[in-house]
């Protein structure tokens, strides 16, 4: 079997990381990319040594050589493009959020199942080696009964009133920002590692900076600020900078998390702690090779990522000896490896077990976000409704 041929739609920050991760696999080839116009597509394709450039993604979908398409566009385009990818008969890997509403994500999930295509969502934090190790430990009962799950996802890239990005516009980024953008990752990771689904939420959201100053020049996401004087326009902000959410899991386990994009000094700090009846465990994405394990009657421990110390079920997620730390790009590559191995082995998405996040996970994420927004609006507990057609 030859290499799996792939097309990428959108080559911003996340699109470039998809390309880099896919190229590390060896048995997958990125043969095309699509941009908003032909000139931009040709320029980017030349920079990245990709042979085919499309000024319209629909032209890419007509390319019979391309078997898989990655949707790395802004949020408001996810539903339409994901739907067209499926209808074109190609496997699809989408950035999150899967769509702009749970109604749209339910439609995409049903459609992907109907067409029997492999479907994935880039929830890459579950793919860290030590997260997989913790998932196995919890499955094996090493922490005892899980009682509490708590943590946060904190960033500072929107701390200043002059920080601005397309995600701030609800018509492009969606009606939720911090929850949909980073809270979705936190929820997916803790649900994966604990093996429990979130079924009810009580949320408090806040827009810390209600009016932002948008520069008349473009500044890249996560880009450095320059010291030159800028001209700004005031833009009212309606999406949340911060949220704290009480959560209940399907078995009655309790939890709480906070997300913020205005926490100075926190660059990409996804962290969580799981308190079991016998032991606790804590993980922080900014120090991804360390798992803190807490005890009552003996000294606490720090497990460093090391295949020699991992459970057999987790060793496939780690690729280097202990001390050779694997981080964010490696977790992304793990997700791509699992997704493309599933395709290469000809597995059936309707019947075979997957080891990556699917549209089902993406739909659940949308349902949780919808419930959080409804809870904040009504100031009460709201159940997560996850209804899927087909």
Image (cartoon, grey):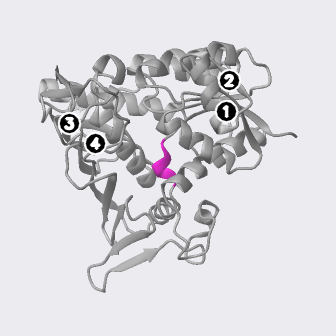
What's the residue at 31%, 52% (across, down)? 267
| Nearer to me, 71 or 132 | 71
In the image, residue 257 above or below residue 346: below
First-in-chain label (2 vs 4):
2
Quadrant of the frame with the C terminus: top right
- Report which quarter residue 39 is drawn in: top right
| Nearer to me, 241 or 308 | 241
| Nearer to me, 332 or 179 | 332
In the image, residue 7 above or below residue 26: above
Res. 390 visible in picture = no
Q: Which residue is mark 3?
A: 241
Q: Which residue is mark 2?
A: 53
Res. 201 visible in picture = yes
CA separation in Å, label 2 and label 1: 9 Å
CA separation in Å, label 3 and label 4: 23 Å
Circle 4 SS class: loop
């Amino acid at each position: 079997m030859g290499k799996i041929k792939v097309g990428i739609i959108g080559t911003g920050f996340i699109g470039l990381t998809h390309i880099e991760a896919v190229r590390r696999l060896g048995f997958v080839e990125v043969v095309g990319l699509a941009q908003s116009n032909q000139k931009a597509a040709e320029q980017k394709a030349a920079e990245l040594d990709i042979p085919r450039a499309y000024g319209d993604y629909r032209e890419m979908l007509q390319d019979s050589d391309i078997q898989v398409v990655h949707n790395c566009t802004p949020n408001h385009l996810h539903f339409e493009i994901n739907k067209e990818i499926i209808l074109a008969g190609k496997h699809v890997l989408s950035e999150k959020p899967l769509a702009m509403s749970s109604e749209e994500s339910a439609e995409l999930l049903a459609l992907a199942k109907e067409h029997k295509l492999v479907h994935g969502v880039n929830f890459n934090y579950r793919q860290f080696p030590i997260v997989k190790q913790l998932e196995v430990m919890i499955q094996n009962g090493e922490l005892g009964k899980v009682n509490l799950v708590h943590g946060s996802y904190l960033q500072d890239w929107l701390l200043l009133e002059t920080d601005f990005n397309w995600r701030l516009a609800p018509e492009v980024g969606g009606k939720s920002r911090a929850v949909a953008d980073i809270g979705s990752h936190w929820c997916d990771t803790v649900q994966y590692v604990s093996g429990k689904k979130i079924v009810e939420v009580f949320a408090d959201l806040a827009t810390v900076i209600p009016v932002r100053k948008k520069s008349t020049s473009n500044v890249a996401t996560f880009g450095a600020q320059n010291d030159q004087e800028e001209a700004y326009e005031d833009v009212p902000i309606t999406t949340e900078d911060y949220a704290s959410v009480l959560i209940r899991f399907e078995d009655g386990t309790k939890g709480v998390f906070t997300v913020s994009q205005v926490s100075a000094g926190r660059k990409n700090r996804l962290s969580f702690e799981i308190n079991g009846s016998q032991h606790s465990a804590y993980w922080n994405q900014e120090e991804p090779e360390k798992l803190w394990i807490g005890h009552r009657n003996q000294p606490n421990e720090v497990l460093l990522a090391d295949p020699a110390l991992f459970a057999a079920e987790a060793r496939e997620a780690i690729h280097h000896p202990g001390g050779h730390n694997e981080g964010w790009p490696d977790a992304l590559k793990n997700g791509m490896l699992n997704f493309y191995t599933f395709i290469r082995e000809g597995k059936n998405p309707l019947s075979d077990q997957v080891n990556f996040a699917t549209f089902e996970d993406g739909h659940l994420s949308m349902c949780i976000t919808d419930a959080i927004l409804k809870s904040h609006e009504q100031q009460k507990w709201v159940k997560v409704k996850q209804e899927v057609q087909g």
